[in-house]
Structure formats: structure tokens, C-alpha cells
Image: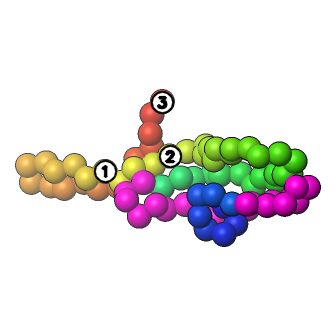
Amino acid sequence: MPNGTVSYWVKRGEVVIYNPPPVIDFGDNTRLLGAEPCELRADRPTNCTARCTKCQFYVVVYMLNKTWEDWSMRVP
């Protein structure tokens, strides 16, 4: 949300515009890509759920003589 938290209060009729960054890194080896800007007008209490187009996880694979690590896309 605009104030950096998971909840946000606005007055009735107020418009909230959220322009997410191209990559949202949660710092726990998970990041979201491709979140689109959205505009919400408050006319009643409501819950909104953020959705992303791509979710990636940082994966480390330990092999016999090699270690591979990179961001991997979640497969639906």
C-alpha cells in the first residue's frame, strides 16, 4: 500500500493509486514481478488482494562438484 503496510485507511470517495516497482523483493528468497498499477476509489469498507503476474523463488541446487543458484519461476 502507499504507506508501506498491509492495511490502509482512506476517506469515502478518496482515490488510492498504487504504482508498484517492477520487482518487489520480500527478502525471504521470494520476489514478485510484473505487478500492474491500480487505482481504487473508496466508497465502502473493502479488502483488496494484490496479485502478481510472476512469482520467483531463489533456488540453490547442490550437486556433487558444483552448486547452481538462480531465480526460478513458479510453475502453476
The quarter of the rendered structure image containing the N terminus is bottom right
Pick out the residue farthest to the top. Answer: 76
Q: In this view, does 64 lie above or below 3?
A: above
**Amino acid residing under circle 1:** Val
* Numbered mark located on residue 59 in the image: 1
Distance of label 3 from label 2 (alpha carbons) = 10 Å
Q: What element carries label 3?
A: loop
**Amino acid residing under circle 3:** Pro
Q: Are marks 1 and 2 in contact (CB under 8 Å)?
A: no
Instruction: Between residue 39 and residue 58, name the one nearer to us.
Output: 39
* Numbered mark located on residue 14 in the image: none
Horizontally, residue 43 falls left or right of residue 31, namely right
* Residue 26 locus on image (x, y percent): 46, 61
- Mark 2 surroundings within 10 Å by alpha-carbon count, few (fewer than 14), some (14 through 19), many (20 or more): some
Q: For the magenta stretch, what is the residue range?
A: 9-30
Q: Do the residues labelled 1 and 3 touch (CB within 8 Å)?
A: no
Q: Magenta stretch: dominant SS?
A: loop
Label 2 sits on residue: 55
Distance of label 1 from label 3 (alpha carbons) = 17 Å
* Residue 30 locus on image (x, y percent): 42, 54
Horizontally, residue 68 falls left or right of residue 13, namely left
Q: Which of marks 3 and 2 is nearer the N terminus?
A: 2
